């Protein structure tokens, strides 16, 4: 019984760690997107391609480098929102080796 309870607790912890909010930027302002990232730390954003607005894109964005893996850092990126074509957000990229 203890093993079953322990397995159930561990699986709930794993599921909550994987959960990520998803936002469609077309219906949100830049300020709303930035606020959501600040609140959530990490989120998947669905946004329009800057070159071809009819093409939907999606990717994962973060509030800061603290939300990236240790082998990565955040860099500025831009998504299209309801009120602007260039809303600045942050995206994790691998640290370059020197």
Image (tube, helix red, strand yellow):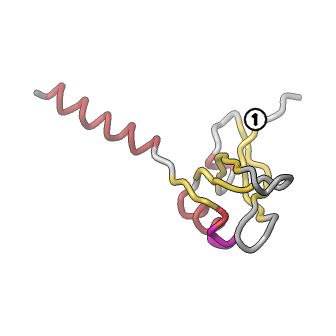
Residue in the picture at 54% in, 54% down = 22
46 up-or-down from 33: above or below: above
Looking at the rendered structure, the secondary structure element under dot 1 is strand
List x then y, in percent, for residue 59: 67, 46
Q: Is residue 87 left or right of residue 32?
A: right
Nearer the observer, 85 or 38: 85
Q: In the drawing, does residue 38 fall left or right of residue 2?
A: right
Which one is nearer the viewer's eye here, 74 or 80? 80
Residue beneath the point at 22% across and 31% down: 6
From the top left corner, tell me how far across and down residue 62 is, in percent: 65, 52
**Residue 14: x and y, percent?**
39, 37
**Quick check: 21 above or below 31?**
above
In the picture, measured across the screen, residue 40 lies left or right of residue 32, that is left
Is 66 placed above or below 95 here? Answer: below
Residues packed near mark 1 inside 10 Å, few (<14), some (14 to 19) or many (20 plus): few
Name the outermost residue toward the left: 1
Q: Residue furthest right?
A: 98
Q: Which residues are magenta?
A: 27-32
Dot 1 corresponds to which residue? 94
Q: Quadrant of the N terminus?
A: top left
Rendered location of residue 37, percent (x, y): 61, 60
Q: How many marks?
A: 1
In the picture, the quarter occupied by the C terminus is: top right
Give the residue drawn at x 18%, y 33%: 5
Q: Is residue 10 magenta?
A: no
Q: Quadrant of residue 85?
A: bottom right
Q: Main secondary structure of the magenta part?
A: helix
């Amino acid at each position: 019984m203890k093993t079953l309870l322990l397995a159930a607790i561990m699986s709930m912890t794993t599921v909550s760690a994987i959960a990520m909010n998803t936002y469609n930027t077309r219906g949100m302002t830049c300020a709303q997107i930035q606020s959501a990232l600040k609140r959530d730390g990490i989120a998947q954003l669905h946004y329009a391609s800057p070159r071809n607005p009819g093409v939907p894109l999606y990717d994962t964005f973060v509030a800061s480098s603290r939300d990236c893996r240790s082998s990565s850092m955040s860099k500025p990126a831009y998504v299209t929102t309801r009120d602007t074509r260039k809303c600045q957000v942050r995206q994790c990229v691998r640290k370059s080796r020197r």
